[in-house]
Amino acid sequence: HFGASARHRERRIPMKQEIFRGIATALATPMELDGAIDYEAYGRLIDWQIDAGVAGLVACGTTGESATMTEAEHKEVIRFTVERAAGRVPVIAGTGSNCTAKAVAMTQYACSVGADACLLVTPYYNKATQAGLIAHYTAIADASDKPLILYNVPSRTGCNLLPATCAALADHPRIAAVKEASGNIGQIVEVAALAGDRLAIYSGNDDHIVPVLSMGGSGCISVLSNVVPREAQALCRRFFAGDVAGAAALQCKLLPLVNALFSEVNPIPVNAALAAMGFGKGGVRLPLTPMEESRRAALLAEMKRLGVLA
């Protein structure tokens, strides 16, 4: 479901809005070795993810290499994802930018072609003060007619979205959730304490799914689930069913694969993994480079251990 009714929004009653519950895959964008987008492979990946039971799909996030897409490519991948998903699961479009005007324009485009929500990374490079983050996200939310997910990943952006800022932004009726990839569990606990009744919290790190769920989180926007969507969704399903020990055991079982998928800069390894599974050729765009062979061999060995590859 997509949040509060119109009556609740008008009255601005604090209410947690879950765009999805469980795993939404941060889709890689399969590419040819020359960097051309392989839409045939991408379409098959979308279908396989949905058939495997994921709860949502994220197009044009960091994992999708949006940073090196032209504006036309960015729009086309969002449109293609919405059309291919065809309403089977929510599609969340990555529309963030370090330029507020660009983020507004891309968010409005994604809404216009049927995205169910938008994911907005904090401004990178130029960064922002916390007051600037409030102004940035408020401007985008005011221009959007779909729910927004804030995205905090300071290791990539150099900009940390603080819990008090999340709490302030949670008052906006279209700011529904936060993807927390700070890696700081204490900070995530503080977000839950200040805004957990008004913002759905999604883990942005695959090694923190159970810890975030334990603080009332709603799921994870996952790189891991590109490769093992059923297992990633099963982890959340176990937790929500009350089998915390079973969820924790599966988190631990999958940890070596998570580590292998982040042994080089994301999304280099996940593209190598998907290529081995028949989704694209594993191409990436500069400044990313193909995976080093020793790490690739370790990744493929872990995939074989889990039965992903024969």
Image (cartoon, rainbow, N blue to C red):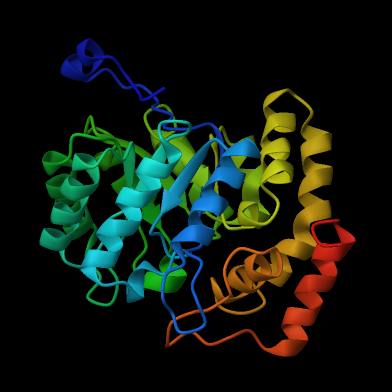
Q: Is residue 275 above or below residue 83?
A: below
Most foreground residue, 157 or 105? 105
Most foreground residue, 139 or 35? 35
Q: Is residue 178 left or right of residue 215?
A: left
Looking at the image, can residue 150 be seen?
Answer: no
Q: Is residue 151 left or right of residue 134?
A: right
Q: Name the image quarter holding the N terminus.
A: top left
Q: Is residue 242 above or below residue 25?
A: above
Q: Residue at x 43, y 65 (%)?
A: 62
Q: Residue at x 74, y 44 (%)?
A: 231
Q: Position of residue 226 (x, y in %)?
A: 61, 55
Q: Position of residue 8 (x, y in %)?
A: 25, 14
Q: Residue at x 67, y 89 (%)?
A: 292
Q: Position of residue 74 (x, y in %)?
A: 29, 62
Most distant residue in the top direction: 7
In the figure, residue 272 lies in which quadrant? bottom right
Q: Is residue 14 above or below residue 280?
A: above
Q: Is residue 298 left or right of residue 39?
A: right
In the figure, residue 14 lies in which quadrant? top left
Q: Residue at x 58, y 58 (%)?
A: 223
How many numbered markers are drawn? 0
Looking at the image, can residue 106 be seen?
Answer: yes
